[in-house]
Image (cartoon, helix red, strand yellow):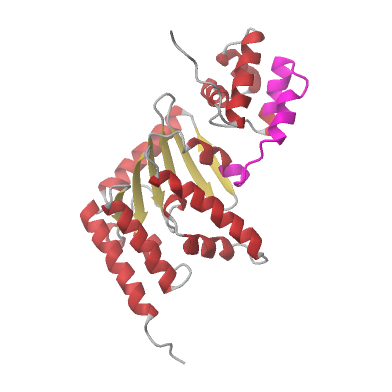
Amino acid sequence: MEINRKPRTPREKYGEELRLRRIAAGLTQEALSEQVVCSPTLISHYEAGRRLPSPDDARRIDIALKTDGFFVRWLADLDSKFAQFFSAVADLEREATEIRQYGASLIPGLLQTGAYARAVFQAYRPNYCTAELDAFVVNRMERGRLLTESATPVTWTLLDEAALRRCIGGPQTMAEQLYKVADMAESGRVRLHVLTFASGAHALLESMLYLLKFSDAAPLAYVEALRTGNLMDDPALVGACQGAYTLALSEALSQRDSVALVRAIAEEQEHAQHQPHRR
């Protein structure tokens, strides 16, 4: 006899309630998606607890299911500790079986050290407070634990050389960050490849990229810009992003050469740290 797994998290409970109310209303996922004006795949993600609807989608769900604002009100109690445009990705990556990430100018968040993350957060918050930065860093470090857990997803990391050479937080912080990336690659936690400056133009010049695969759902793609992000589930768009990643990967160094380059740049940063300052 098949036993259904009970919802564990508040988001899974939200999704399960949505599924039950939809069935009670006599609607398929496709029928509900037409009224919400989204894809059936998105409804599937909502019901599985992988994603939360936007406030507008929640309002349309309430209208379609005649639930009198129920899902809008519950949604307000599920605020994420991440930026609104990234919160869905933070939830989804924990369900992923494979992650492919590309860092254009920064080391991706899953691989960041605390000091590196703090320097990044501080850079675009001129009027920051220490407690706020501490909370951001804690959240990012908790995300990073995903790659040290027993059920670690297969993780490919493609880095532009610019992400390795931009000194974030000073030489010591940068050296520690690069050594962490190299150590994780050599330990088998991530598959690392570097796109060097010598490779010239490549398919991912315009954007960072995050690709997610799942065992029981369609793949997704995510891109991000200043204060905004776009999570894509349209098969054509996701396929195009996957193709761009494959093209860029074909221009990159092997893992062995990539690790060697990362360590060499880390050593350069260590050397710079001990150089006397010129007046």
Q: Is residue 71 magenta?
A: yes
Residue that protrudes farthest toward the right in the picture: 68
Count of residue discs: 0
**Quarter where residue 171 is shown:** bottom left
Q: Nearer the viewer, residue 1 or 257?
A: 1
Q: Position of residue 105 (x, y in %)?
A: 43, 59
* Left or right: residue 92 compared with residue 77: left
Q: Position of residue 81 (x, y in %)?
A: 62, 46
Relative to 249, does residue 16 appear above or below in the rendering?
Answer: above
Asked if residue 207 can be seen in this view, the reply is no
Q: Position of residue 96 (x, y in %)?
A: 42, 34
* Left or right: residue 104 compared with residue 253: right
Q: Main secondary structure of the magenta part?
A: helix
Q: Which residues are magenta?
A: 58-86
Asked if residue 233 can be seen in this view, the reply is yes
Q: Quadrant of the N terminus?
A: top left
**Quarter where residue 170 is shown:** bottom left
Write the residue at 70% across / 23% down: 60
Write the residue at 41% across / 39% down: 211
Residue that protrudes farthest toward the bottom in the picture: 279
Q: Nearer the viewer, residue 116 or 1?
A: 1
Write the residue at 30% across / 62% down: 262
Relative to 114, does residue 23 appear above or below in the rendering?
Answer: above
Q: Position of residue 85 (x, y in %)?
A: 59, 43
Q: Is residue 104 magenta?
A: no
